[in-house]
Amino acid sequence: MSSTLSFQKRFLKELQNSKKFLILSTFLGLVVAILYSYSQSPSYTAKATIEVGFEPNTLNYSMLVDTKTKIIQSKFLIKRALAKVDLSHFYYQEIDYKKKELYHQSPFTVYLTKGYDLHFKVLAQGKERYELSVQGKDWEYSSVHRYGQRVSNQYFNLIVTLKNGKQLTKNPYGFVVYSQENILTKVQKSLYVEQLDNSAIISIAYSDTIKQRVKDFLSALVDVSIAHSKESTPRATQISLSLCSIQLGEKVLLNEDQGDIQKQEELLVTLSQNIDNNKSLDILLSIDSKYRDLLSKDIVQLQKLQTIESQDTNSSPSKTTNIEILQQKISTQIVNIQQKLNKEKLLFQKRIEQNIPKKLKGDRRLDSLYSLDKILPSYGLFISLGLLIAIVVAMGLIAIKTMFRYKINSFYQIKDQMKTILIGVVPHTKREFDEEGVVITSLMLTESFRTIRNNLNFMPQESDSQVIAITAPNGGEGRSMIITNLAQNISLNGQRVVVLDLDMQSAQLHQKFNLFNDEGMSSVLSNNMMISTVIRSTDYQNLDVVTAGPYPPNLWSLIQSNRMVDVIQKLRNVYDIILLNIPIMGTDASKLLTSVDVTLFVLRADVTRLSFIQEVDKLNKHTEGFAVILNDVKK
């Protein structure tokens, strides 16, 4: 049998034995699912649309619309909307174990400056007072206050005031004032913005549990979005022109440089006048370098000629003519530069006329609220998931229990895995005493040993008497209890029984029968005492016991000696049943077992390892009349 198949069989058997646990787990899962469904509130989703101020044929149109959608979703714009609609204050009332949100219907208002994200509870204490309670991580607070009274400590600072004409009812109230960062994150998670079919229309959707709050916030967000678009139009114009200029591959003076064009024109006019009037030409230094370079050579030459002329009182007409020619040349160059500036100015103005008025404009509202959907909690889904999770968890726990359960715990667990005969199952019983302090033997325990006694009649025996060896794989399996109760039960049936205690190292049988242990089997096997001299009678008429006696150093040598075989043969002539209490079979006991008819191997539930079943089957192959007793079974 493979280990997988073995696990499957054990798991299925464990499932059969855990029916109550499965039913209870399923029931609890159902209850939790129903309670969770009950606690859920309906959700509302509202939608609105706006038309952005970019036409589809605008350059970089897709990028501009995508930027617009991200701006609407940004915390910057949400903050503006929250300034119009208060979403930070969360008021509720507990009715029938359910929190009912109040929004504007709250009978009181809270002004809070410290203590954000704490969950406060409010309970009416008459018309003028209320009880405020709150619990932090390692602190709690509860006290009665007047309405309008400031409540301040190291954890929070707030004022609770009643609205005009309002009173608190007996049901408890509660409130939370969320921090700005938390409310921004919460809103962003419930906000959905998308472009509709590559058009200039953007759809904005917002979800919340209060119908009116959904309407208020969505309307406020649309308003601030449109207002922001109007504020941004001049800047958008500059961006559009920049993109246009770059894509056309032309160097154009843009809006912010229009003032430079006019300034350059004014400087050129002044320079021309100074040349004509023979004034200082230092103004050249204020002219843009790309124009100054065109004029600087001739102007420097002009300045030199003018300086020479001013110093030479006898200047010739030819020098004066050279100065005039040079002045005329510079004036012509200035005119050419002015013409170039005029062309660039005209080109810039045409760009504005062709692109800006038609393609950059403010956003406008299309539908303030074209859809308002109410989404009810999926009760069927919650209940189904609750049942499924409960069953999966329960079966998982049973599988883990099966996987890690390495000890025998029931008859069914070893029934299909062990090839050895299971001659009897002894149930777990609690020790009870009568008024005189005598242990009361339970009916179930008596019946289990009667069954074992009857099954022994079907086991082999060489003569009229039957020798039965009782042993166990380890200490603690309950051999002493088994052999005591079995001996008593057989003797009450009229058969003569003798018990030999060979467990000389851990002798206990003499205590079970209230006998002395000064002499016993060790005395007979080592000192050649007569067996008849150490046989002790008990309170049961047909039951005798030979105690273990003093502990010898050579225990197994004595047990496997010829003397032991002789003792058993002599006792066969006197008793119907001979019970041998053999210590743990850690050493070869083959010689002793050849003298017995039946070997009963005691396994104890929740003590004996499950893996030992294989060892039991190996012993069964090499031992005649081998059978197993499962002791202390709780189920």
Image (cartoon, grey):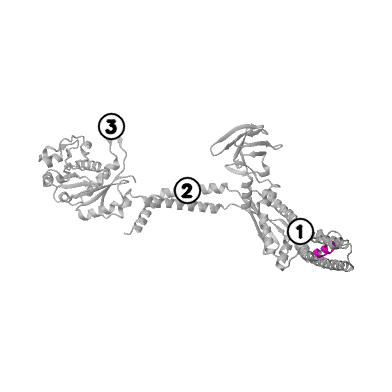
Label 3 secondary element = loop
Q: Earlier in the sequence, mark 1 or mark 3?
A: 1
- Distance from disc 1 to disc 3, alpha carbons, whole Å, reads 110 Å
Farthest residue, direction front: 314
Q: Which residues are magenta?
A: 300-306
| Three-letter amino acid code at the position of disc 3 | Gly
Q: How many marks on residues?
A: 3
Residue topped by disc 2: 27
Indicate whether residue 302 is drawn in magenta: yes
Dot 1 alpha-carbon crowd within 10 angstroms: few under 14, some 14 to 19, many 20 or more: few
| 137 is higher (above) or lower (below) than 33 | above
- Residue closest to the eye, 278 or 217: 278
Farthest residue, direction top: 436
Question: What residue do we see at 29% from left, 41% from top?
Answer: 443
| Three-letter amino acid code at the position of disc 2 | Phe
Dot 2 alpha-carbon crowd within 10 angstroms: few under 14, some 14 to 19, many 20 or more: some
- Give the number of the disc on residue 256: 1
Q: Earlier in the sequence, mark 2 or mark 1?
A: 2
Dot 3 alpha-carbon crowd within 10 angstroms: few under 14, some 14 to 19, many 20 or more: few
Q: Residue 56, located in which quarter of the rendered image?
A: bottom right
Residue topped by disc 3: 437
- Residue closest to the eye, 162 or 426: 162
| 243 is higher (above) or lower (below) than 104 | below
| Three-letter amino acid code at the position of disc 1 | Glu
Residue 271: x %, y % from top left: 84, 61
The reply to whether residue 364 is in sight is no
Residue 259: x %, y % from top left: 79, 59
- Residue closest to the eye, 183 or 545: 183
Question: What residue do we see at 84% from left, 61% from top?
Answer: 307
